[in-house]
Structures are given as C-alpha cells and as structure tokens.
Amino acid sequence: MTDTALDLDACAREPIHIPEAIQPHGFVMVLDRSDLTIRRAGGDIEGLAGIEDWQGAPVSDVLGAAVADTLREMMASGLTGHVARWRSLSRLDYDVTTHAAGDVQIVEVEQSSQEAYLGVDLLSRLDRAGTAFERAASVRSLCEHAAREFRRLTGFDRVMIYRFLDDESGVVLAEDGSPELPSYMNHHFPGADIPRQARALYVRNLVRVIPNVRYEPQPLRPAAEEALDMSDCALRSVSPIHLQYLRNMDVGASASVSIVKDGELWGLVACHSARPQLMTHEVRVAAASLARNLSRQIKSREEAEIYRERLRLRGLEDELVARLPFSEPLHRPLGRHLSRVAQLLDADGAVVLRGDQIARYGSCPPEEALPELARWAAGRGRAEPLVTDRLPELYPAAADWASSASGMLAFTVTTEEPFVMMWFRAEQVETVRWAGNPHEAVKHGPSGELTPRASFDAWAETVRGRARRWTAAQVESATRLRQSIFDLRSARQLRRLNDTLRETVADKDTLLKQQDFLLREVNHRIQNSLQLVSSFLALQVREHREEASVAVALEEARRRIKAVGLVHNRLYRADQFETLDLSRYLRELGDELIESMGADWARDVQMTLAPVSIQTTRAVSLGLVLTELIINVQKYAYGGCPGPVSILLEEDRDRLRLIVADQGEGQAEGAAQGGGFGSRMIDSLVKQLEGRIEHLPNDPGLRVVVTAPIQPSSS
C-alpha cells in the first residue's frame, strides 16, 4: 500500500461522529429520558443559563418549566426538531431543538438570529427559488439558478454547486460569489477531500454549519467511558483536519447542504464566507427544503434527458434494421451503412469484421490491427457488449493508435469466423483543473499527524488515453441491435431451411411441439412435486402445532418452497432466455405472490418498477430476494396482518435499486439483520449479485434497499 493510500484510509477511519465536543455558539444537554435530568453537558451552560450545579438537575432548572413541558410533550409524541425559543441571561435569543440518541435525549441550545425571518418571508424566498428551478432548461442551468438562490437565502459570500463523479472526486458545476473570495468554477476536488464516513453523515443530515472555523471545541462534561453518538447534533464539533482544510482555503465560515437523489449523495451546496457567519435554525430548515426541491428537479431533468435519448436511439435502431435485407449475408449491408451504424452510438468510427472481410468508417485503428483486436474482443465473451472509454488500459497495443480509438464498444455475433461489430471513439485529451494538487490531498505533518493540503491554487492535469464515456442508453441500444441481428440471422436461416428442406417442415413442427410438450411436462412435474412437498409440510405443521418451534420451522419451509415454485413458474413463462425485462418479471412474480397472501394484502401493496434489461440468472436471484423481503414483511411488519407495502425498482446509470418499504412497527428490522435462514439467504444472494443491502428507518417502519450492478463485473 502506498503512503497516499494509507493516509486516505486513516482519514476514512476518523470517528467524526463521536468528537465528544461541540462548537461554542450554544450548549448541549444529554438528558435521562425517564425523568429529563441532565447527565452531561457541553458549552457555556453556566454563563448562559446561570446555573452552576447542573449535573443531575431537571432540564426545567435550565430552560424553564414551559420549555420543559413542550419537550416532554414532543417526546411522548415521538417528535424531534424545534422545541421553542429561549432567552439567555445575556438577553439573546436561542433556538432549542431535540432528538433521541440511543437511551438518552439530546437537547441543543444554539444562538438564533435576533431578527428572525418572518414565516411569509421565508416562504416567499422558497417560492421564488422553486419557480426559478422549474424554468431551468438543463441540469447545469438548474445548478446556476440554485447557486444564486442559496446565496440569497443564506447570505454567504460564495456558494458552489458541487457534484460527485463516478471516481468519488467532484467538480464545481455552478458558483455565485463575491470577488472577495476566489472562484473555483469548473475546478475538480479529489475524493479524499470528503471521506466516506463524512458522506454518510451528509446523507443523514442535510445541513451542516461551521459559523467560525477558528473556534475552540467545548468538551462534553463529565467525561464518559462510552462516547456519545453525535451524528444528528447541529452543534457537533468538526474534524480538526476539516477545520484546517477550511483555514487553508482562507474561509471564515462554512455551511454545506446535501443534494440527495434517490437516497444517494448526488452533490453538495457548499457555502463559504470570508468572516465568521451564523446560519440560524430557520434558515437551515429553509435550506433543507430548497435542497429537496433542487434534488427533485435534478432527478426530473436527468430522467427526461435519458428518456429522450432512449426514444432517439430506438428510432435510429428501427431505421437501421429496416435497411438490412434477407437476401444477403448481414455483414454486407451493415458495411454499406456504416455511417448510420456509427451515428447510432455517436461514435467517431465503426467497423464490421467477418473473417477476413473488413468494412471501416471514420476514425478507426489501422486495418492490420483490426483482426487481432476482433479476436481479443470475441474472447471477452458474447453475453454482453464490451464497453470501455480507456481501451489502452485494457488492450496495451491500442496505445499506438490511441488518438483515433481510445474508446471502444463491441459485440460478437459469432466467434467461429469471427463476426464482430465495433464502434470507436477518438481520444479526448482533457485538461482537468484541480483546486490544488490532488496527489497531495492528505499528507503527514511534522509530528506524524494527518493534515490537509495547504494549497488550493489551480493545478492542471492533462488526461490522455481516454474517450467520451458510453452512456447506459447507448449500451442498451447496442444490446438491442445485437439481438436484432441475431433475430435476422435466425430468420434468414429459417428461410433457407424452408427453401431447401420444405419436405421436413411437418416433422420439424412435430419435433418442436414435442419439445414444448416436454418442457411443459417438466414444468408441470416440478410444480406438482413442489406442491406435494408443500402439502406434506402443511400436514406436518398441523401435526406439530403444539410444538411451536417445529411448527414455525415447517411453516417457514413450506412458504419458501411455494415461493421457489412461483419464481420458477414466472421464469418459465418469460419470452426471453439470456435477458429479460426485470420490471415485468418482478411485477408478475410479485402479483402472484401477493395474491397467494390474500386479497387484503393485494390492496395495500404498491409497485413502481422502472424497466431494466438484465440477465436471466440475475433476475432469478433478485426474484428470490424480493420473495424473501415480502415474506419478512408479511411475518414481522404488521404482526401477520395486512399493511401498506411499497416496492420500487429504479435504475441509476449502471446500477439498479430494489426497495421494499413498510410502515409497520419495525419488528422486521431485527429479522432482516438477524442470523436466520432468510437473512443468510438474502445476504448470500446479494453477495452473488456483487451488491449491497441496507436496512434504513422508514419513520415508521423499515426500508430495505438492495443496490447491485445491472451487469456483473466479469462481463
């Protein structure tokens, strides 16, 4: 491991959620939930509240009986957030907020604006910003509007809209600021600037504020053996590395507002001022609301762009396929229409190679290099297209002609000759402007401690050997074209067989019918066998009803056997073998499974499934995962009774998300995270899919999110 890798790993392990200290523009009290007495506190509680002996005292001694009563009512109702305004001995107003953390209640008292916004003023600001967002024609234009509106709302000197990229680095898409601070427009920042555990907190808490980057942390008192989880504390003290980072940028105050899209951190609204600046509770609430609006608008525009791109590609595909006749080998008409083939995927060049016959168009590798390149591409497998925007990294020989072909998308029609179609994109030499040298993102100080880089001067890096990235819609289009070519080849072969073997058609039809009959018979026998085992287990459940653990285990086995039968039955009905539409497969599977649970369940289940093309084997695994999650909801969420269930399937670039959410009492969380057979089965299936599973609170209920790549990494 390199020194840089070790540094970044150390940053990623920094326990920023348990600093045991707060920022000094308020104070924090950690209360016993049973009687609201103060266990611990941080900040100048003595000076602001005028109470010295606060440990063990009731919270009413500090904040007054009225605030304490409101706090007690909120806790009884399960509410969190703003409690009341409170006036300190200095006659300054403070905002009181609260939330639960484990077995304690945390109360934060932070300085408020002494000239608070009127509600109508904040609503007018949000309404004006929302109108500006709706008028934006593109994501970049939307971000430009957002930078201006967030600056008007917060009053910070500089506001940047910062988007995370696939490699975890980020780029400033839009900026609105005063000349007092330097501009970072279009600058890139390395991923190490925001470690992973910090990104997790950004998703959890939309707004984070540092009114003065040169503050002295105020420790929690008295010291405790177990550190307090301060993830949701607005006053939580910030990592010293991050504070030094901001000071190195000559920033006096900082605020960040998360842009979260579909549960993922899309980017940040980064706010900086040259001097200390407070961001009060009401402004933070307004900023969080504005960020949610921005996230919805970003999602809407991105989805609209993808939809338009898919429609355009469908039209081009249909036009190209219509030009492929039955009367000659397919590589010949494809070669004649190579300009349209290249246009289909917005490529700079295209090649159709079949054996020693080569047709080229546009910017391509040298002709003598194409046969070996085609053999290499064919050797990478036929299941899915080969896609790369960095061909020299995968195929070293490509470095000699990287200027004409640094990006490649290819699929194999047949491997025997071979018959390969290839698209190429020329090298796109790009100068990336970084805010400081990204290779010095984190380093060691004189005493061995980790320190952030000190320079944010523009640092340019020239990137070579890369091309424009292929979009998910373009890869899908190539996959459909490949299927269309297969279909055409099959149709041509059938026509040729019909012409030469007409007398055997009847026998062939008979054979096909027998084959179909055999498949149906196999399916019928499998279903009968599973039904027989299910019935036997149901009988065993009745016989062992007095033995609760045995009955539960048998009933669990019976349910799973029935579920496996449903998965198999839905797969048999699919009209494709290698790939299928996952949304259709899951909807039919879910409808049949829910129908078996009873009509009451069917009324409470809502499915929103986006179309995703996926390999059949991966669809089966996802079908089993969905089946287990629905069974968990049925068993645990509502105590066996029907209740609302939401099933969502979403696509985000090259990944998919399957979400099952209930509004139950949360019992399913223990089952989902436990060590039972179902949990182990789900974990194993998700691991096979190279994905991850998250169990998140749904307020109320549980939200289970399964994220996995649409295509396996081996492809």
Image (cartoon, helix red, strand yellow):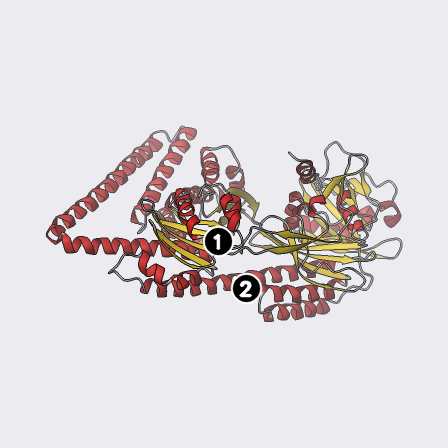
Q: Quadrant of the C terminus?
A: top left
The answer to whether marks 2 and 1 mark residues whose Cβ atoms lie closer than 8 Å is no
* Marker disc for residue 650: 1
| Percent coordinates x, y for residue 325 in the rendering | 27, 62
Q: Work out which residue is located at the far front of the displayed protein and give it.
A: 368
Front residue (pair 682, 199) = 199
Residue 666 falls left or right of residue 331? right
Q: Earlier in the sequence, mark 2 or mark 1?
A: 2
641 left or right, relative to 139: left
Whether 615 is drawn above or below 125: the answer is above
Q: Give the number of the disc on residue 239.
A: none
Relative image position of residue 705 (x, y in whole percent): 52, 46
In the image, 24 versus 559, the foreground residue is 24
* Residue occupying image coordinates x 85% and y 57%: 92
- The local secondary structure at tag 2 comes to helix
Q: Is residue 314 visible?
A: no
C-alpha span from label 2 to label 1: 16 Å
Residue at left 55%, top 54%?
262
Picture mark count: 2
Kindly identify the amino acid type of the residue bearing the numbered disc 2: Arg
Q: Amino acid at mark 1?
A: Glu
Q: Circle 1 sits in a helix, a strand or a loop, which is it? A: strand
- On the image, the x and y values in percent for residue 333 come to 32, 61
Q: Position of residue 194 (x, y in %)?
A: 68, 47
Read off the residue under disc 2.
301
**Does residue 284 show up?**
yes
Label 2: how many Cα within 10 Å (few below 14, some 14–19, many 20+): some
* The N terminus lies in quadrant: top right
